[in-house]
Amino acid sequence: MNTIKIPTSFNIDLEFEAADIGLRFIAWLIDLVVRAIFVWIFYTMFGTFDMTDGAFSAVTLLFVTLPALLYPLLFELFMNGQTPGKKVMQIKVVGLIGNTPSTSQLLTRWFFRIIEQPFFFFAVIPVISIVRSPLKQRVGDIAAGTIVISTKQKGKIEDTIFRNINYEGYTPSFPEIMRLSDRDMNKIKELLDRALSGDDMLASRVANRVKDVLKISSNLPDTMFLETVLNDYNYYTTFEK
């Protein structure tokens, strides 16, 4: 399994173990078996019902075909980038900075499965893409801006100042924060973590220092103020790019 280094906006490389083709294929097979069992249960339950061909086709479409098609999308949406097969194989889908993929990203990956199902010659497409991609991405991953990694990643996103927050409608409070560097913000994050462990005086000193340097004022509690400037910095360095 290869190591992938993902550069963040904060001059820190996150290291992940890339899921190789073998693990991904086994995960796919497990999911295929799960879907096959589901279909078998359906036909066992409904096969004995006295229905017209049209009614049976409609029921099959609604309760078999659609769930089978939507299986990877729904599970990845509600299991944070995993399907049962991926969970068993300890791999998952994440965004390019290690974050949980958005709904639109997962929709894009799912759409590209149409041409990437590992049946017959279509298997050539994802295999070539994964082998040639520096980040081991299939075409759907490249289009969606996602990667598939081992859940035993070597680097943790929590070790950076990245905040996994939905910024739609978010209004930053302190645009002055962009006068600070990545190194400054990482130091603030480090000190805030220490302050949250019980050092209220440290939070006060750091907050006052930030206010003095940036010439800003705020009535927020010290820890909340520091969380806000970290969120604002994330907004300006990621969401607005």
Image (cartoon, rainbow, N blue to C red):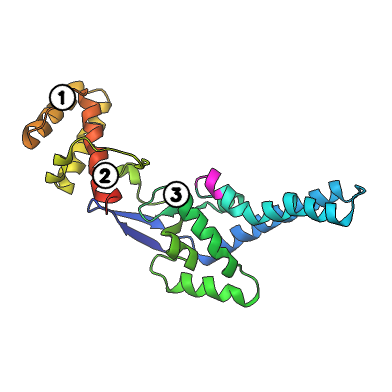
Is disc 1 in contact with disc 2, using a CB cutoff of under 8 Å? no
Q: Say which element carries label 2.
A: helix
Q: Say which element carries label 1.
A: helix
Residue 14 appears left or right of 217 = right
Distance from the alpha carbon under mark 1 to that under mark 3: 36 Å
Please state which amino acid type lies under the numbered disc 3: Ser
> Which percent across, then down, holds residue 126?
52, 70
Q: Is residue 134 magenta?
A: no
Instruction: Give whichever of 106, 2 is nearer the camera.
Output: 106
Q: Residues within 10 Å of mark 3 (few under 14, many from 20)?
A: some
Residue under numbered circle 2: 234
Q: Residue at x 13, y 40 (%)?
A: 176
Residue under numbered circle 1: 204
> Which percent across, then down, holds residue 93?
48, 54
Q: Say which element carries label 3.
A: loop
Q: Which labelled disc corresponds to residue 102? A: 3
Stretch in magenta:
76-80
Per the picture, the main secondary structure of the magenta-coloured stretch is helix
Distance from the alpha carbon under mark 1 to that under mark 2: 22 Å
Lower position in the chain sequence, tag 1 or tag 3: 3
Q: Given this view, does label 1 or label 2 mark the residue nearer the observer?
A: 2
The answer to whether residue 1 is visible is no
